[in-house]
Amino acid sequence: MGRVGFIHDKLDIKFLILYIASRLIEPVGIDVLTDLALCDEGVDYFSFSECLNELVESEHIKKTEEGFYCATPRGIRNSEICESSIPYSVRIKADKNIAVYNQKIKRKGMVRANYSQRPNGTYTVTLSLSDDVDNVMTLELMVAKEDMARQLSAHFQSHAEDIYNTILDALLKKYDGQ
């Protein structure tokens, strides 16, 4: 039994790959591009892989030295011309998946957490939060153990906005005698 889906041939797959790559905010690994392109049941991994390689050879897609993929100016131009050839339902699903991915990448760039060991054996944890314009908050904490530094970093990565709001609430709270 043949594949079911709205994408039916290699040209459709190439249009879809270009459509996706031209809307991503940064180059991506093959795993991300694969996940985004498999949004239609008519696309299988082997056809996708073959089409991606052909798009790289034709210079519609660039493979960076780090192994990431992005649309070239030529690929973006052709994507704009051919996007109406992609079935509407596939474009809608791809747009939704691309938006979710781009939002994750934007957030990752706005939330930073790292730690380093001090000469005395303790650790400095640096947590920062930015918006689209500027740095909103930078907080440095000293902790005794690496596992605590790792936990603080991971927790901040997951809950930066809530932590920021909690800090603001604590700083703006009226205390007795003030």
Image (cartoon, rainbow, N blue to C red):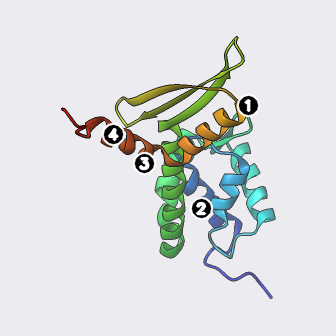
Q: Residues within 10 Å of mark 4 (few under 14, many from 20)?
A: few
Q: Residue at x 47, y 43 (%)?
A: 160
Which disc number belongs to residue 16?
A: 2
* Dot 1 amino acid type: Glu
Q: Are marks 2 and 4 in contact (CB under 8 Å)?
A: no
Kindly report the distance in space between the C-alpha atoms of the residues bearing marks 4 and 3: 12 Å
Q: Are marks 1 and 2 in contact (CB under 8 Å)?
A: no
The answer to which image quadrant residue 27 occupies is top right
Between circles 3 and 2, the one closer to the viewer is: 3
Q: Residues within 10 Å of mark 3 (few under 14, many from 20)?
A: few
According to the picture, the residue beneath numbered tag 3 turns out to be 162
Which disc number belongs to residue 13?
A: none
Dot 2 or dot 4: first in sequence order is 2
Quadrant in which the C terminus is drawn = top left
In the image shown, does 102 or 55 lie closer to the viewer? Answer: 102
Is label 4 in a helix, a strand or a loop?
helix
Is label 3 in a helix, a strand or a loop?
helix
Give the total number of marks visible in the rendering: 4
Which disc number belongs to residue 170?
A: 4
According to the picture, the residue beneath numbered tag 1 turns out to be 65
Dot 4 or dot 3: first in sequence order is 3
Between circles 1 and 4, the one closer to the viewer is: 4
Dot 1 or dot 4: first in sequence order is 1
Kindly report the distance in space between the C-alpha atoms of the residues bearing marks 3 and 2: 37 Å
Between circles 4 and 3, the one closer to the viewer is: 4
Position of residue 82 measured from the top left corner of the image (x, y, whole percent): 51, 60
Dot 1 or dot 2: first in sequence order is 2
Between circles 1 and 2, the one closer to the viewer is: 1
Dot 3 or dot 2: first in sequence order is 2
Q: Residues within 10 Å of mark 1 (few under 14, many from 20)?
A: few
Q: Residue furthest bottom?
A: 1
